[in-house]
């Protein structure tokens, strides 16, 4: 999930048994681990750096086009500005190869921007915010690989939580909303220009900004966005408001960062999880939901995660990979059964080498090298073959 403080829901969900039919569906690694993706062949040039890069990676088996689902992965990039463009190009190829190896056809690049407190009327970049020209290296690499590309600026919460543990991006209450939206527009401007210049498919205009949703100032921001960016614009609701919000966002695509709290124990089967997921989405609308995107789906590989998937505990307890795997399988089955616009798994860190992850010691949130990784491949393979 995006950050530790994203879920603020009260009460548990009532699960209605619908009998949904299942749709077919980071430490050093041990020396003997073989990466599942191993590029081979001739050199290619990395980004706009002119640096010879690794050989071509795996090929997309189910390219995205209008009418097909977005089978995606969220890549999160907290930048280290001391790294050279050559290193960025190397990492961009590495993460792109890994995403394609998962049978994905889409990638969403999330990156942080900042504000000081929930009352601040300005936003800004910081050391962790990748500059547009650096971000462009990854966007170009992903596009060259044939992936559908989405750009998603995401408000970092560390300063908010430091001031008040109950604050998060969904509780913003700026002294001046006019000033906040003007500042946000100024921050977005170079990234929207970047997205247009690099022919990016989509930009998610906002993510989990609960307290600002429905504000009429979004209309002006969306109108401005359309003057400089000709692709799709979207908005990602947080899971805790998605099923009942009446806020209307002036975008082309709405979606949800999906971490529903399901009143199920660790012994719950995939069928039970699928039914509970379907019941949760059913609170929004019955039947097919082809205009809805699951912008984030994830769950840590740890005990008790079905009841609080947005807030995993970082307590050093052993990972329980099968719980994460079941969650992934159930989420995919429901997304397919309801004909959603697509699904993005959370997350792959831009700086991580997937071939050097020891899943027995890696953070519980990660799916790399765990059974959930294969669940992703199975999900995308079956979903793709069905179109």
Image (spheres, rainbow, N blue to C red):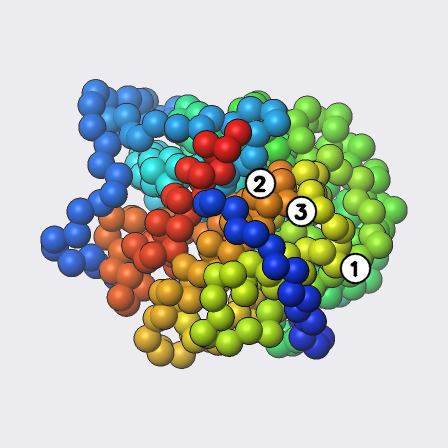
Label 2 crowd (10 A; few <14 / some 14-19 / many >=20): many
Q: What element carries label 1?
A: loop
Find out whether the residues at labels 1 and 3 contact each other: C-beta distance under 8 Å. Answer: no
Question: How many marks are shown on the rendered structure?
Answer: 3
Up-down relation of residue 250 to residue 158 (above or below):
above
Up-down relation of residue 80 to residue 299 (above or below):
above
Label 1 crowd (10 A; few <14 / some 14-19 / many >=20): few
Work out how far the residue at label 1 is from the one at label 3, CA to CA, in angstroms.
Answer: 13 Å
Find out whether the residues at labels 3 and 2 contact each other: C-beta distance under 8 Å. Answer: no
Residue 64 position within the rendered picture, expressed as x and y whole percent measured from the top left: 52, 27
Find out whether the residues at labels 2 and 1 contact each other: C-beta distance under 8 Å. Answer: no
Label 3 crowd (10 A; few <14 / some 14-19 / many >=20): many
Between circles 3 and 2, the one closer to the viewer is: 2
Name the disc covering residue 255, or none.
Answer: 3
Label 1, on which residue? 244
Viewer-nearest residue: 368 or 286? 286
Is residue 73 visible from the viewing direction of this image?
no
Tell whether 276 sits left or right of 379.
Answer: right
Work out how far the residue at label 3 is from the one at label 2, CA to CA, in angstroms.
Answer: 10 Å
Viewer-nearest residue: 237 or 3? 237
Which residue occupies 24% across, 26% down? 55
Residue 220 position within the rendered picture, expressed as x and y whole percent measured from the top left: 83, 38
Which residue occupies 34% across, 27% down? 59
First in sequence: mark 3 vs mark 2? 3
The quadrant in which residue 380 appears is top left
Q: Is mark 3 on a helix, strand or loop?
A: strand
Tell whether 124 sits left or right of 140.
Answer: right
Viewer-nearest residue: 326 or 177? 326
Work out how far the residue at label 2 is from the one at label 1, CA to CA, in angstroms.
Answer: 21 Å
Label 2, on which residue? 342
């Amino acid at each position: 999930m995006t950050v530790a403080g994203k879920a603020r829901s009260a009460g548990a969900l009532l699960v209605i048994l619908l009998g949904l039919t299942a749709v077919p569906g980071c430490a050093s690694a041990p020396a003997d681990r073989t990466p599942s993706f191993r590029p081979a062949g001739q050199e290619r040039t990395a980004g706009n750096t002119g640096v010879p890069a690794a050989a071509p990676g795996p090929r997309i088996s189910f390219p995205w086009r209008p009418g097909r689902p977005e089978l995606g992965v969220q890549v999160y990039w907290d930048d280290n500005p001391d790294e050279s463009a050559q290193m960025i190009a190397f990492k961009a190829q590495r993460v792109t190869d890994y995403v394609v190896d998962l049978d994905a056809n889409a990638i969403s690049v999330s990156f942080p921007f900042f504000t000081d407190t929930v009352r601040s009327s300005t936003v800004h970049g910081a050391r962790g915010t990748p500059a547009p020209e650096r971000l462009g290296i990854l966007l170009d690499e992903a596009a060259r690989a044939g992936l559908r590309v989405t750009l998603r600026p995401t408000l970092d919460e560390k300063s908010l939580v430091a001031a008040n543990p109950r604050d998060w991006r969904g509780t913003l209450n700026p002294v001046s909303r006019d000033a906040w939206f003007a500042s946000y527009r100024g921050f977005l401007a170079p990234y929207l220009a970047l997205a247009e210049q690099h022919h990016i498919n989509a930009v998610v205009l906002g993510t989990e900004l609960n307290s600002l949703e429905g504000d009429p100032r979004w209309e002006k921001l969306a109108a401005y966005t359309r003057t400089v960016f000709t692709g799709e614009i979207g908005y990602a609701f947080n899971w805790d408001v998605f099923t009942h919000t009446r806020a209307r966002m002036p975008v082309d695509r709405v979606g949800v960062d999906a971490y529903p709290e399901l009143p199920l124990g660790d012994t719950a089967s995939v069928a039970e999880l699928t039914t509970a997921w379907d019941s949760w989405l059913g609170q929004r609308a019955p039947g097919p939901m082809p205009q809805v995107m699951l912008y984030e789906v994830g769950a840590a590989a740890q005990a008790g995660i079905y009841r609080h998937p947005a807030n995993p505990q970082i307590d050093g307890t052993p990972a329980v990979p099968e719980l994460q795997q079941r969650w992934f399988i159930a989420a995919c089955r429901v997304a397919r059964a309801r004909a959603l616009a697509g699904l993005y798994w959370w997350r792959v860190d831009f700086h991580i080498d997937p071939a050097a992850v020891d899943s027995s010691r890696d953070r519980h949130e990660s799916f790399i090298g765990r059974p959930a990784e294969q669940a992703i491949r199975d999900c995308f393979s079956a979903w793709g073959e069905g179109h």
